[in-house]
Image (cartoon, coloured by chain):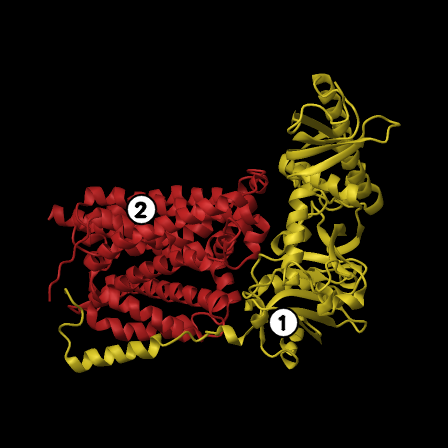
Chain colours: A red, B yellow
Amino acid sequence: MYRNNTISPRQFMYLVILFTIGSSILIVPGPLAAGAQQDGWIAALLSLAVGMLLIFLYHKIGILYENKTFIEVTIDSFGPWIGRGISLFYILFIYILAALVLRNIGDFMTTQIMPETPLQFTLILFLLVVIMGARSGIETIGRSSEMFISFIVLLLFFLFLFVTPQIETDNFQPIFGSGLKPIISTSFTMLGTPILEMVVLLMIYPEVKEKNKAKYAWVFGMLIGGVFLTMITLLSILVLGSDLTALNAYPSYELASKINIAGFWEGIEIIVAIVWMVTIFFKLIILYYASTKGIAQFLLIDDYRTLLLPLGMGMVVLAIVAYPDVAYFENFVGTSWFPYALTHGLFIPILVLAGALIKRKRKSKK
Amino acid sequence: MNNNFSFLPISKRLFITLACLLFLTGCWNSRELDDLGIAVALGIDKTQEGNYSLVVQMINPSEIATEAPSTRPPVSLYQSEGETIFEALRKMTLSAPRKIYMSQLRLLIIGPGLAEEGILPTLDLLYRDPEFRTSFLVTVAKDIEVEALLSVITAYEKIPANKIMDSIIAAESHWAATHGVYIDQIVSDIRSPGKSPILTGILLEGSEEAGNNISNVENVDSPARIHVDHLSVFKGDRMLGWLNEDESKGYNYILGNVKSTLINFPCEEKESGKIGIEILRTNAAIDATKTGSNPSITVTLEAEGNVGEIQCDLDLTKPETLQEIADKAEEDIKTKISAAITAAKEQYQTDIFGFGNTIARKNPTYWKEVEKNWDEHFKETVVKVEVKLDIRRKGTIVQPVQKKG
C-alpha cells in the first residue's frame, strides 16, 4: 500500500481552520451571548489572543522532538510507566472529546432536522465515514481539507452576505455595557471550546513539513477559524439580539434561517448547515485519527488502522452514554469542560515540556 | 492507496455495496408530500374552561393546483381543543385527514380572549418546535372569533392566509398604519424590559355567515372581507387595547417603519380643498439624554416626499409655496407622533417605542436603576420630536389644474 505521511503547512492551516470552526459553531455563540450579552463577540476575540500564546507553547513541544507525537514525547521524557500514566489522561481526553463532538452533531440532527430518527443511526453513519477517512491517513485528510475549505469559506461568506440586510445595529450597543468582568469570564467558554482543544493537533504536528512555517500556519489557522466564529456570534447578536441568541439552542442555525433573498429564496438554512457537517467531519477525523494513533503508540502497535473499527464501536456507545440529556451537556460544558480542557490543554503540556527539557539537559551533561 | 476497494475481493466489495444500499435507501424521517397536511394559518384562543382551542387552515392541494374553476374551497378548516397547544395539534388528526405540517405556516392569529390573558406561554411551542419556521406573522383578531376570521374565503388570492399576509405587507409599505410582526420579534419584545410589543389587528368586514361560503368569491364585491387593522398595544404579554389610525402611523414614524405613505391636510384653514403629500422615504432616529433626574428622548425624523395631489389653486412655481406645504406636512407628522406618544404614556402607560432600550444603550448605568419599574419612569419621560421634510418634486405638471394662466 502506498503510504506517505506528511502534510504541507498550508494543509495544516486548513485543518486548523476546520478544527476551530467544527462543532464550536453550534455550541459557542449561545453561551457567549448568555454570558456577556451583546459583548459576546469581544469575549471571543479575547480568547483568540490567549490562543496565540497557547500555540507558542504547543509549537515549543512540537519542535522539541521533530518527528515525535505528544504521546511519544511524554513516554520518552517520563519513562515507560509514568509517561504512560500521563499519556493515558491525554488519550482519554481526546477520545472523550471525539465522542462529545460526535454526539453534538447527532444532537443537532435529531433536534433540528430529523427529530424522529434514532440518535445511534445518525452517529453510526457519521462515524463510518470518519473511520474511512482516518483509515486513508493524514495525507489524504490534508488533501481533502484543501478541497473542502473553499466550500466552507464560500458558504460562510454567503451566510454573512445575505444576513447583513437583517442587521439591526442597535443590538450590539452598549459596548462594554456591563463592564469587563462578564467578558473575561465568558471568554473561558471559547477558550475551552475550541482553543484549548487544539492541544490535540500535537498528535499530527510531527507530520507537518517545514516546522518554521507550520507555527505561523497554526496561528493563522486559529485566527481565521476564530474570526469566523466571532463573526457568527456577532451576526447572531446583530440579527437576533443577544437575548434570542442566548435563548436558541443553535443560534447559528437560527441565523441561517433568517436568510431571505428577494422574498422567495428562504428556508435555505440546511444548505448553510453543510458548513457544520463538513467542519465537524474534519474535526472528528482529526480527533479520531489522533486518538487511535495515540492508543497505538501507547500500546506499541505498529499500525493504528487495526484499532479504527473497534474504537469506533466504543465511540458510538460512549457518545450515547456520555450524557443522558442535553441539559446535562449544557451544564457540563458550562461548568466542567473548561477546567477539564485547561488541565489537558495547558497543565499537562507544561508538565511534559518541563520534563522533556530537564531530560534533554541531563542528556547533554552526560 | 489510489483506490480503497481495489485490494478487496469481489465478495467484500459486494457486501459494502449492499451495506450502502441498506443505509442510503431513504431518510428515516422522510414524509412524502401526499402525507402532509400543509397548514398556512393557525388560530389560537382559549375556551371558557381554560383549554386551548386551535383552528388550522389547511390547503387543499388539488384545488390550488387546478386551473379549472371548481366548487370546492381552496382551503379547509380543522379545529380541536387541548390543555396544551401540542395536545390540540395532535388531537387534530381526529378530524384532519393528515398530520399537520407547520413549516409553511404564514400567519398566526391570536384570539382576543387569549391576547388579553397573556400570550407568552402560547408562543413557547411555536418558537421551540423545529417544524415551525420563524417566517410567519403574528396577529390579533379584533372583536371577532378566530374561527370566523379564518373561515372567510378570499377572492384574488386563493389561500386566505396568503391574502392576509400580503395585505399586511402591502399596507405596511404603502400606507404605514400597520406593522407586521414575526414570531421572533414578538418573543424578543416581550422578553425585553425596555420595549412593550405591538401586534397587527385583523378584522372582518361584512357578514360572518357569507364569508364561509364559496359564493363569497363569486361576487365582484365580496360580502365578507378580511381587513387589516391598526396596532394593538401590549404590556408584557397582555393586550391592553388598540391604537387608532393616526396613532399607529405615529408609532411607525417613530420606529422608522414608514417606507411610503400619504399625508393629507387642507390648503387653507377654511377652504375645502386639500393637499396630499406622498412620502417616499423616511429615516428615524431615537436618542436619549438625561436631564436632571428624568431621562429625555429625542425623536428625529427625516423624510422626503413629492407633491401628490392639489385641490386648490396654489402657485406651485414659487419655492415658498413648497416650503409652506412642507411645513404643514411636518406639522401633521408631528401631531401623529405626539398622538402616539400620548396614547402610550397616558392611556396605556407602557413603552411601546423601545425608549427604554435606547436608554439602556446610551446610559447602561442609569438604565440599571430604572429597569425594574421602567413604565413608571416612561410616563415622566420628556419626548422631543423633530421632523424635517423635504419636498423635492411635484409630479408631471408644474401647476395645479385649477390654476389658470
Q: Amino acid at mark 2?
A: Gly
Q: Of B35 and B132, which appears nearest the observer?
A: B35
Residue B256, percent from left and from top: 65, 38
Vertical placement of residue B399 versus A135, above or below: above
Label 2 environment density (alpha carbons within 10 Å; few <14, some 14–19, many ≥20)? many
Label 1 lies in what chain?
Answer: B
Identify the image quadrant of residue A23: bottom left
Q: Of A66 and A362, which appears nearest the observer?
A: A66
Residue A54 makes an appearance in the image: yes
* Number of the label disc, if any, that sits on residue A221: 2
Q: Which residue is mark 1?
A: B70
Label 2 lies in what chain?
Answer: A
In the picture, the quarter occupied by the N terminus of chain B is bottom left
Q: Residue furthest front?
A: B405
In this rendering, position of residue B341 left or right of residue A98: right
Residue A232, percent from left and from top: 46, 48
